[in-house]
Image (cartoon, helix red, strand yellow):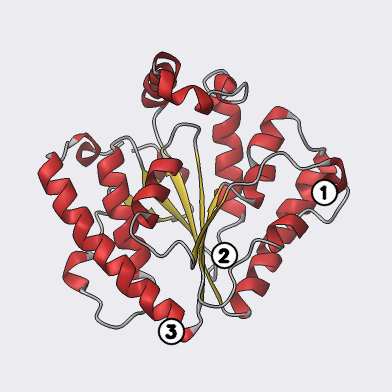
Amino acid sequence: MGKKDLVKLESSSYDAQLRLLQIELVKLQNSLISKGDQILVILEGRDTAGKDGTIKTITEHLSPRETRVVALGKPSDVESAEWYFQRYVAELPKKGEFVLFNRSWYNRAGVEKVMGFCTKPQYTNFMDTVNPFESILVSSGITLLKYYLDISKKEQAVRLKAREDDPLKQWKISPIDQQAQKKWDAYSKCRNDMLQNTSPKDAPWIIVRANDKKLAHLNMIRDLLSRVDYPGKDKSLLKVDQEITFKWDGKISSLEK
């Protein structure tokens, strides 16, 4: 992780910066609704990387009627027998909607592969078809933004322990989370393969170094806003710290800083 990851923001500075960025998000949504555009944001990442908190900062002041957070559970027996993408297609954004996937079809490239929840042919089929599938979404007019939140093994251990100790976070503890440290290397291998093979030009992965949650929130929102057009954009607010948030460059070494 970079040195800037370790810089802690004062709460007052963070709140002030976040408020300005949330105003920009409202501007974006007003444009989205008026034009009938569609935005789909995919958030993937390590267990405890902060996907829930990041989504909360993005959606806090957006219209609940035109904003949806999708976090699908384990597929039913019927869904398991269907085309893999089918249940996700039903959740795609409609005209004027801003949709965020808290985990997505990339479960197959991560937790399902690591935990043995899918077969090798199922995994191979997914990796062979996900890029063409996403290209169809993009060519149909959906703005697709994919973010991978990454943290260090040490930071993950700290956050897992905090969940165990906090009675308000008990719902976040799962058997899969409890395997995160033991299977760290396996998850790293799957992450690397996923990033390497599913980051085409029309739907690239954006990496967010999330050891510092506040820096991750601010820089991911800046990046998101910088990638879409809307009237009244204040570009002075959208300078992204490339040590924190950056487009996947195909180099595994860039994840280890």
| Residue sitting nearer the eye, 124 or 83 | 83
Give me the disc on residue 34. Answer: 3
| Residue 18 on image: x %, y % | 22, 54
Q: Quadrant of the C terminus?
A: top left
How far apart are labels 1 and 2 at the CA level?
Answer: 28 Å
Label 1: which residue? 79
* Quadrant of res 131: bottom right
Q: Earlier in the sequence, mark 2 or mark 3?
A: 3
Q: Callout 3: 10 Å neighbours few (<14), some, many (20+)? A: few
Label 1, secondary structure: give it.
Answer: helix
Task: Locate residue 120 relative to residue 219 in the image: left or right.
Answer: right
Res 253 visible: no
In the image, residue 90 above or below residue 13: below
- Nearest-to-viewer mark from 1 and 3: 3
How far apart are labels 1 and 3 at the CA level?
Answer: 35 Å
Q: Quadrant of the N terminus?
A: top left
Three-letter code, disc 2 = Pro
Label 2, secondary structure: give it.
Answer: loop
* Quadrant of res 175: top right
* Quadrant of res 228: bottom left
Label 3, secondary structure: give it.
Answer: helix
Label 2: which residue? 200
In the image, residue 19 above or below residue 14: below
Three-letter code, disc 3 = Ser
Task: Locate residue 59 relative to residue 176 in the image: left or right.
Answer: left
| Residue 146 on image: x %, y % | 50, 57
Three-letter code, disc 1 = Glu
Q: Earlier in the sequence, mark 1 or mark 2?
A: 1
